[in-house]
Structure formats: structure tokens, C-alpha cells
Image (cartoon, rainbow, N blue to C red):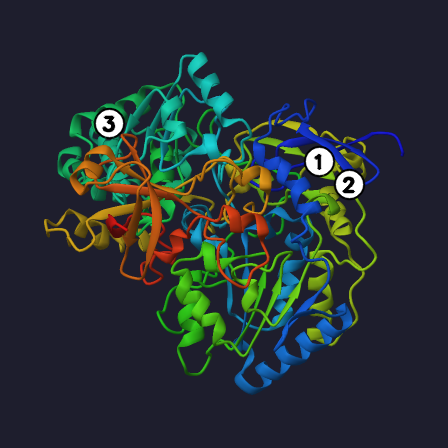
Amino acid sequence: MNEVKTHYRNCNICEAMCGLEIKYQDKQILSIKGDQNDPFSKGYNCPKATALEDFYYDKDRLKTPIKRTTSGWVDISWEEAFDEITEKFKAIQHKHGKNALAGYLGNPNAHSLGNAMMLKPFSKSLGTINRFSSASADQLPHHVASNFMFGAGMLIPVPDIDRTDFMLIIGGNPVVSNGSMMTAPNVIGRMKAIQKRGGKVVVVDPKCSRTAKIADQHLFIRPEKDALLLFALIHCVFASNKVNLRHLAAMTDGVETLESVAKDYAPEDVAEFVGIDAQSIRQLAADMTAADSAVCYSRMGASTQTFGGLCQWLTNVLNIITGNFDRAGGAMFPQPAYDLLRNHVKGHKSSFGQYHSRVRKLPFFNGEFPVSTLAEEIQTPGEGQIKSLITIAGNPVLSAPNGKQLADAFTELDYMVSVDIYLNETTKYADIILPGTTGVENSHFDIFFNSFSVRNTVKYSAPLFEKNADQRSDWQILKEISSRMNNSPMDPYTPEMILDRELTQGPYGEEGMSLQKLIDNPHGIDMGPLMPCIEQRIKTATGKIDLAPRIYLDDLSRLNALMATAPRDQTYPFDLIGRRLVKSHNTWTQNSARLVKGKNPCTLEIHTQDAQTLGIKQGQLLKVSSRVGEIHIEAAITNDILQGVVCMPQGWGHNQQGTRMSVAATQAGVSMNDLTDASKVDTLTGNAVLNGIPVAIELA
């Protein structure tokens, strides 16, 4: 055997960009540990990193194309697969129109260098406007707020967590997620550093999460009431004359309009509905304005709800009016080496609402429609009906709302293709599955997550192992289909060629930034803390922040209806919310034996008093039902959840017939998205509602 070698790379499973040190011998991985010399993660990594090894060796993983036949799945050649796919796609579009073909992009695409480079030309080659992705089941409200306030959807402000003195976390659990829209490895260490330097962390959440347990203060809030709380905090800032725009005073429009609107949301007016008393709200506002630096960070619980768009707008507003925007310790814009906004001109016309979905008229944005509309766009007859679909690294049957409706819709397609390494709950409906390489076989560079990072760093990872001769990388699969759909020769560009161009022409190009420089620095390069840069980064036509875009003001009637006193429908008396798990990431880590072994984590948390009222005991099997479906799940009784609220993990349910996922079959859990309702969306942005779902509970 050859000598033991060491490989350095970033983990690509979640957003944290943790640096890894992988010991290997020949093609055998010996260990995966945190890279102590990584300037960003500094040796930290979470348990999910071991899944890179599990994916590589997984006996369930597909390595050659397979095709559905009347007698089952059979292996086919790449050439046969590409020939059939392009022939079918073109025939369907010729018969039914270009938009009869649709594409769905799953979360792993954002973690793939090759896919990030090739998806735009690939989508263009399909010639359809019907594109969907996991973004509208996750983060769309963030991008819409940035679009209307700062002029670009990818101009996302992130908390300068390493220098803040006061951090308010609403509907987020970054200790478990390692940040989300806030790329930050070792959040627990960063939170403790805030406390060590005399600062304070406050969490507002219907559940006392792992983050809340570490924080200095936790406030329970009723689901979907976060926008009312944010407005009340903004009201307090204005009422106490604490507005301080600092250096943004001359470049902020809409302050007077916002002050006028906020007058209607005094703490006394909203306290009953949010479940937090008026004095606590006023004290929270006072603590934030009194801190030398402060930042409000709101995430999944505030985004994937009926008022997600308003929540992310108001989060930005609160940071701006308290003088904590584009300033150390506040909310700041990263300046990544690969700048996705390098060619984005000021005043660029937004794509928001350029089209609307055919059935429900939800807005098109950033090249896609909301995923909540996908099933109905397949199942509703008429011009523009989706007849064919390609899914890429996604499992929407488990990750998108009303998964069973989506599964039924997939059976009605004329033709379906999936690019995926597994025969899973979504890809089992495909006619052909094309498996790409994964993890350690791919080169890696975090294009998107450097744009959300709490520190400016940069790192490139070469492949650890070369793929076999009969394997294709995802980006090679996409390029091949693109070439055939365009009837043109395949272009010669590789992801590395594009990456090198963007690095050398980017903001650090004059300092010698290049792909070769990153290859020469395998641990990564630290370019320093976030710096004030809004004058250079903002992309609005006026060069100013729009604090009160009309789209949000027009949505306030929906929010105000929350404060009506109509009695709750007792058919579904509980509110269901999701929860994060350290050893799980969406739907794509459940075939790693090391991450799913042990006690079943897919349980329904219910408050002790609610359990007593219903006669529920620990571990009993419950039937949970919503308007669209029902599941059976084990009870976990706790005081860490607000009364009237129940909580379960997202991303489970790998127990369906027709899949090849042996580990998942033994620890499969149930899918929360058999309960979530695709008809329930944030109508402002189109984002799916995955929190605050009305449910009923009884013993199974």
C-alpha cells in the first residue's frame, strides 16, 4: 500500500464552509477532522462532515444511468440516456410548447461548484420559463427584500457576529444550522465570545432551541407573529427618538413613511397576539438601541411562514434605523473574491413579477416560480401545462409542501428525468436517472456561501479522488444535455476556467487573486473582517436604500388582519413548526449510517400541559392531521415548546416503496411535508409556508 496522505477541502454539506483535513491511503479514507489551519473554521466541524465518506462508499449510490422499464430499472449507457432524453424533451416541447418542460433544482446545487457554474446556461438551453427550486421553500423572502431595498437579490446583509455586542435571533437556530444565510462555522463559540466580551444574545422562538438554551434570554412567541413583534420594536425606536442612521442618513429614503406606518404597532397593541408582554417588547428595543453595536438576525421560522416577506424587510429596517447597518457589529455586506454582483449594474430591472404562475398567479423572481405551484402546474390542464420535468439534486416529495400531492403529480407527467445519486422518493418517478459524482470526487469552491459569510475568506478544493472512467460529474451531464438541446458543439469551458477568470477579474484580482493562488494555499486565505462598503455594493438606481418599498406597504392589510379577534378554528387547534437536527441537513444526509444511528430523532415535541390534557404519554404513537394529510409519529413531551405549538424535524420520510436507500429504511421517520399545505404561501414573495401549520393531534 502507498503512504498515508492528507487532503484539505471545505465541507460542502451545509453552509458553514468548515475546513476539513482528510487522511487517506490509496482510495481509502482513514479520517475526517477539522482543519486547524483553516482561517475561517479554525478546526471546527460538525458531525455531518463524515457523510462525505459515507456518500462516496455508499452501496446504494447510483454510478451509471438507469432507465425505468416494465420489468424494473435497468442500466443503460450514457449515450443511450442522452439520446432518449433530448429526443423526448424536444418532442414534448414541439407538441405542447416550450413551457411544457420544467426544471427543479434542489439544495445541493448551491453546494456544487460545477452546478453553480453550469445551471444558468443549462436552464437557458431548455427554453422554458418553468423553473423551480428549493429556494422558495427556504430563503426567497431574504432575496426579495434585498431586491427592493438594495437593488439586487443576492446583496444579502449578514450579522457581523464576531464584533457585535447585542444579537437578537428571531426564528433561527444557528447553533444547530451553523448559520443559514449567515455562513458561520462554530456559532456556539461565536455566541459565547459575545457573552465573554460583555454582550448579550436574545432568542425569540416558539421553541426553546439549542441556540436559545445558550443565549442570555429566550422569549416564546406565537408562530407567524414575528412581523408584529418586529413592527413593535420599530415603533419603540421611533417613539423613543432613538433613530440613528449614522452614515446612511443621506442615502436612505422612506424614513418618514416608515415612522407613520409604525405608529399602528405599539407594543400594547400587539402583545396579546405575539404572546410577549408589552414591557418585555419595550425592554428588548431599549437593549438593542443601548448597545454599542447590535444586530437582528431572523431566519427559517421568520422566512418560511405566511409573512416571511414582511419579516425580512422589517429585519433590515430594524438594523438600519438603530444605526447597525454597514457598520462593525451590525448587519454588513460581505465582499467575496468571486463576486456574483460584479456585472450587476445599478438600476438593473428586476425580474420580480416579470411573469406570474399560470394557475395561482404567484410572482416569478430570480429566474423561477415558487415551488408551491409545481404540482398544480402539472395537474391543471390548459395551455402551458407542464408535461415533462427534470429534477437536479433535489427531493421535493420530501422537501416541498404537500409532498403527496407532488408525488401524485409526477405520475401524471409524460416524461421525467432526474440527475441524482439515489433512487429516492422523487427520482423513483423518473423515466431515467443520471447519477453524477459527489463530494470528494468533485472540486469545490463556495460561490454562494462566501456571499453570505461573516468573514471574507476564500478557498478552493481539488478533487480528493478521481472519478471512474464511466462516471460523469453533474456539470458534465448538464453540459451534454445543453449541447444537445441547443444543437451545438459543447463549449470547452470547465468550472475551473470560469472560476479563475472571475477571481482574477474580481475585487481582489489586482492583489494577485487567482485559482493558482488558491491551489498554492490549500487551507484557504483570510481577507479580513467585513468592512463598510454599501456605497460600492448598493445597486438601486438612485444609489439609496429604499426603507419603505410600496410592495411591503401594500401587504400590511394582511398583517393587520392578524389582530382581528376572530376565534380560532378548533378543527386544527395546534400550530406545527419545524426543527433542525445537528446530524441532518434537509433530505440529503439520511443515507449515512453514522448520522441516523441511535434513537429515532423524528419525534413530535408537545408541551407537558397539552400532553396531559390530551392524555398523551412519552413515546406514544400520535396521529397528526392537517387539511392535506396525516402522519403517525412518536410523542416527545417537553416544556421547551410553547403551549399550543408542536414541533418535528423537516427532511425525513425516507420509507416509501420503490426506493433504494437501505439505511433510511431502518431509520426513516415521517415527512413533515405530508402535512404542509402547498396552497398556503406568503403571497407577497410566493415562499412556501412550512411553519405555523394548523394541525390536530390524537392518539394513533
The x, y position of residue 158, in whole percent, is 48, 35
Q: Which residue is at the front of the view, 557 or 218?
A: 218
Question: Mark 1 vs mark 2: which is more N-terminal?
Answer: 1
Q: Quadrant of the N terminus?
A: top right
Labels 1 & 2 near each other (Cβ < 8 A): yes
Q: Are marks 2 and 3 in contact (CB under 8 Å)?
A: no
Q: Quadrant of residue 196?
A: top left
Q: Residue at x 55, y 55 (%)?
A: 106
Q: Secondary structure at mark 3?
A: loop
Horizontal and vertical percent position of residue 129: 52, 70
- Label 2 secondary element: loop
Q: Inspect the image, locate mark 2, and give the three-letter code of the amino acid beneath it.
A: Leu
- Measuring 74% from the left and 60% from the top, which residue is drawn there? 476
Residue 359 appears in which quarter of the rendering?
Answer: bottom left
Horizontal side of residue 367 vs 10, given as left or right? left
Label 3 packing within 10 angstroms: few (<14), some (14-19), many (20+): few
> Three-letter amino acid code at disc 1?
Arg
Question: Alpha carbon of mark 1 to alpha carbon of mark 2: how far?
Answer: 9 Å
Label disc, if present, on residue 464 of the rendered structure = 2
The answer for how far apart the CA atoms under marks 1 and 3 are is 49 Å
Residue 492 versus residue 255 in the image, above or below: below
Whether residue 295 appears in this view of the structure is no
Q: Earlier in the sequence, mark 2 or mark 3?
A: 3
| Residue annotated with mark 1 | 9
Q: Nearer the viewer, mark 1 or mark 2?
A: 2
Pointer 3: what residue? 241
